[in-house]
Image (tube, grey):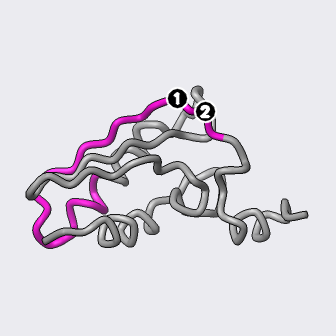
Amino acid sequence: MVTKDDVIAALTNCYDPEIPLNIVELGLVYDIVIQEDKVRVRMTLTSPGCPLHATITRSVEQEIEKIAGVSKAEVEVVWQPPWTQERMSPEARKKLGWSK
């Protein structure tokens, strides 16, 4: 049985190429839904005009589909709520020198 923890672990291998942090640390993942052998991720990007939208989305699908027991991964990119730096983990803000 695939768990959300399995999916989150896989997503730590997905990076926004412009920022040296994975999408989990960045706070881009909003929701994970697992239905039998299918996984749907609801996520956002740091900006609506992100030129690497397709690259990031495909990376997310590929990493999830590497998980044993997953036959299909789908990514829904949403813009509400909008991403802000506050969604980042404290560790991520510290790595970028943005901690208070």
**Separation of disc 2 and disc 1 at Cα?**
5 Å
**Nearer to the camera, 54 or 35:** 35
The quadrant where residue 82 appears: top right
Query: Compared to 24, does 76 lie above or below?
Result: above
Q: Is residue 72 left or right of residue 86?
A: left
Which kind of residue does numbered mark 2 sit on?
Pro
Which quadrant is the C terminus positioned in? bottom right
Dot 1: what SS?
loop
Which quadrant is the N terminus positioned in? bottom left
Residue indicated by mark 2: 82
**Nearer to the camera, 50 or 71:** 71
Query: Residue at point 35% right, 68% down?
Result: 10
Residue indicated by mark 1: 79
Query: Residue at point 66% right, 56% down?
Result: 88
> Magenta segment range?
61-83
Q: Is residue 76 magenta?
A: yes
CB under 8 Å between discs 2 and 1: yes
Q: Position of residue 7 (x, y in %)?
A: 32, 65
Query: Residue at point 10% right, 68% down?
Result: 69
Which kind of residue does numbered mark 1 sit on?
Trp
